[in-house]
Image (cartoon, rainbow, N blue to C red):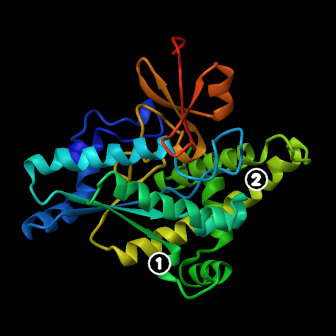
Amino acid sequence: MLAEVMNYRRVPGAHDRCDNSECQACASVHLPKIISAVRNNMPVTFVLPAFPGKSPNPEKVLGPLPDYAEQLALEFLGRLGQRIKKYYSPGIKIILCSDGRVFSDLVGMKESNVTAYQSELSVLKDKLSLADIETFNLDDFYGELSFNQMRDELMKRYGSSLDFLKHKVRNGAGDQATADEQDAHRMYCGITRFLFEDSLHSGQTKSRSAIQKESRLKSYEVIRRSNAWSDLIAERFPEAVRLSIHPQTCGAAKLGIRLVGNESWMTPWHGVAVETKNGPVLLKRSEAEALGAELIYSSDGRPSHYKMGGVL
């Protein structure tokens, strides 16, 4: 079962790739939770903090709602569950912990768009009959509070020190860095890049250097909130195996997982799905259009994805 999931791991690079999908260093972290569920003949629970909401950059995505890119990711998770059910009948349960509300104010996502995305994601999941996939978000935990109050309460209870995080990120770039520090530095660089790209689009008036500086500062707070959300999830779902959209090193507490094809860092909410002769890929919207891809609409008339002729 675990080997099936590990076939789709997202890892930092070739030098960190395990020899095979049965790496004992990776498996040993997660096997106790799997064994516990199997002994009780219960579905094995996985949690995946992901599907926050579409990027606010119109040059990367088609709009604020889930589209064919999200559908591909959900279908992949559904197929994964069905394959596992063939040799373990209780199967697995995957809880998608949508984290858009956690940091929407930092990344430029409108609260109304986060709400609409979460709602449409549930509709899409039901439309695809994915009964083994559930959703959970900050609204479910702090539903009676305003959005700002939700985030304040999250950080009061689960937030860690900013200075401690900066220390880890700085150390992560050094030769003597621990695996935890390397992960912190890698995540900081990745989040900074995403924030920079999301802010760099036609219509904005700031200089590239100003956007870069702002992105570096915001990145620390995004990571602090992401870590706080992760701790809330761990407390809420202590029996669950932890998945992540971010690359994870061998033996880490979480398993990095790819959701669409062989993409490395691209996610459905930071790009668009493009049908090619070799299967679907994820690209930025501007990249798909530069290649001359044809825009395809869904049955309800919304932009859905792109289709290539013969270039890819």
Q: Nearer the viewer, residue 184 or 137?
A: 137
Q: Nearer the viewer, residue 229 or 201?
A: 201
Q: Position of residue 141 (x, y in %)?
A: 47, 81
- Residue visible at 62% across and 27% down in the picture: 288
Mark 1: which amino acid? Asp
Measure the alpha-carbon separation of dots 1 and 2: 29 Å
Q: Nearer the viewer, residue 129 or 49?
A: 129
Q: Position of residue 49 (x, y in %)?
A: 46, 60
Q: Mark 1 and mark 2 in contact? Answer it, CB < 8 Å.
A: no
Disc 2: which residue: 215
Helix, strand or loop at mark 1: helix
**Does label 1 or label 2 sit earlier along the sequence?**
1
Seen as rendered, the residue at the extreme bottom is 144
- Residue visible at 56% across and 37% down in the picture: 272
- Residue visible at 46% across and 58% down in the picture: 121
Seen as rendered, the residue at the extreme front is 300
Seen as rendered, the residue at the extreme top is 310
Q: Position of residue 124 (x, y in %)?
A: 42, 54
Above or below for 25 versus 146? above
Determine the image quadrant of residue 151. bottom right
Residue 272 shows in this picture = yes
Please state if 195 lies on the left or on the right of 20 as rendered: right
Q: Residues within 10 Å of mark 2 (few under 14, many from 20)?
A: many
Q: Nearer the viewer, residue 102 or 255?
A: 102
Identify the mark at residue 140; answer none if there is no mark.
Answer: 1
Circle nearer the viewer, 1 or 2: 1
Mark 2: which amino acid? Ser
What is the count of numbered marks? 2
